[in-house]
Image: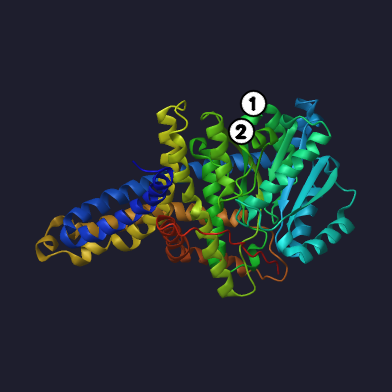
Amino acid sequence: MLSNYQRYRLYEILPGASIWATLIISVVLSFVKPLWMIYAVLVFDVYWVLRVAYFSLYLILSWRRFRRALQIDWFAKLGATFPNWEKRQNVIFLPLYNEDWPVVDETLKALSASTYPAGKLFVVISGEARQQAHWDKIQILINNNYAGQFADLIFYTHPDGLINEIPGKGSNIHFAEKEFKKYADSRGWQYGDIVVSVFDIDTVVHPQYFAHLTFLYCSHPNPAKSSFQPVTLYNNNLWESPSILRVMAFGTTFWMLFSVARLDNLVTFSSHSMSFQAIVDCGGHAADIVSEDSRIFYQCWLKNNGNYEVTPMYIPVSMDTVRADNWFKSLKNLYLQQRRWAWGAENIPYLLYQFKKHQEIPWFKKFIILFHEWEGKWSWAVVTILITVLGRLPLWLASDDVRRSALFFNTPYVLESLMTIAMLGLLISAAMGMLLLPPRPVHHGHHKYLFMLAQWLLVPVSLILFSAWPCLDAVTHLMFGKYLGFNVSQKSRA
């Protein structure tokens, strides 16, 4: 009989084991049964072309909704539809570590320029005691520049070395939520009327964000059972970032656009909003894990017996790419960021372990949510390698008998045709990437637009080195119990 620890460790091994088994079996079959592998590659490539078509369809659908949402005056619509909208308190949590003042300033400037009255926004900024000197300096700058512009500026200092925590965003937010609960209680606020937005410090909101969020919150039949996920655009410093960073930033944005249109697979990611009632009920953002932004959704989903959802927001927030002071550091930051996101595989053992405690949740709901999480990490690590490398391996290793077959002769042409069709998704992404570009800074010439198009040629390289490989790295660490801490992504503005 396995102990709880042994059972959890087994669950941690399974995601990585499924990924490595796929890769190893593919290599072995290429040597011992190349014909089988050729059939498998053809079937997989057909499946992936259908997935690309599916992705492109939802991407276009989401793009249309995104453009339509930007044209609506949400604050006017909010006031006309819900006369009692002012009973809601919008609270923004901004965890801060060692970010430069221009990053913090841009975030607060966007909040103050919101169409929703800035005087009704409560801004909670939580710094780190381990960066006390920097935190003290930032507090002075915030008070000097933004005192009196918001309903309140609330400062918390997250102590260093608290038990059952790992240093990072999750533990910072967890501490701030507990402190803010005292603040809300002292004012007699109802938790269900508090709309909390948990943002990274570089999150620059669209002017209509809070009007749109409050409208959706008031419209929802049970807002305490839903999170609210905006479209994330990594374009604050896009023009100054290296090409690889831009390609990966667009890839993340397009994945978010796809996800918000496909509600059955939508999980909170990075900056998101939710009811403070939901936060209190589930115990707050986890303080001892890396992927607290997605874990909070699963906590709420389990707490509500599977009756918890994510409501899509088609009003965007803008964030930074992980640009550093030089090209090499930027690429290193990108790799570490992608590995940290892939570490979200830690949600798979968490769900498997928790399912036994929640017999009241129907098995098919458990299967669907687990499948989406697991298949997402499997595809992340495996697909690019299968298509670009392992898919060609059986053709290189096939015996003379296999080479004389019609299947072997025609396979390269079939694969080429399938990949040509799959290029549709890349063309759509390139076109949307141009449409999503922020205004061109005056110090960049018009020729830079050509680089913005040419950068898409880097997709195969970027997907292997800065997507598949970091994911393999993450799940392998999880397999062997080599737990990753929270690496802070450096954000730098020119």
The quadrant where residue 407 appears: bottom left
Residue where numbered disc 2 is placed: 226
On screen, residue 250 versus residue 86, left or right, reads left
Q: Position of residue 117 (x, y in %)?
A: 83, 41
Q: Position of residue 423 (x, y in %)?
A: 41, 55
**Label 2 secondary element:** strand
Question: Dot 1, crowdedness within 10 Å: few (<14), some or many (≥20)?
Answer: few
Q: Where is residue 315 in the image (x, y as percent from the top left)?
A: 66, 43
- Between the residue at mark 1 and the residue at mark 2, the CA separation in whole angstroms equals 7 Å
Residue where numbered disc 1 is placed: 222
Q: Residue at x 61, y 62 (%)?
A: 489
The residue under label 1 is which amino acid type?
Asn
Query: Is the residue under label 2 in contact with that under label 1 (CB below 8 Å)?
Result: yes
Q: Residue at x 27, y 54 (%)?
A: 41
Quarter the N terminus occupies: top left
Front residue of 263/100: it is: 100
Quarter the C terminus occupies: bottom right
**Label 1 secondary element:** loop
Q: In this view, does 302 lie above or below 475?
A: above
Q: Where is residue 405 in the image (x, y as percent from the top left)?
A: 12, 58
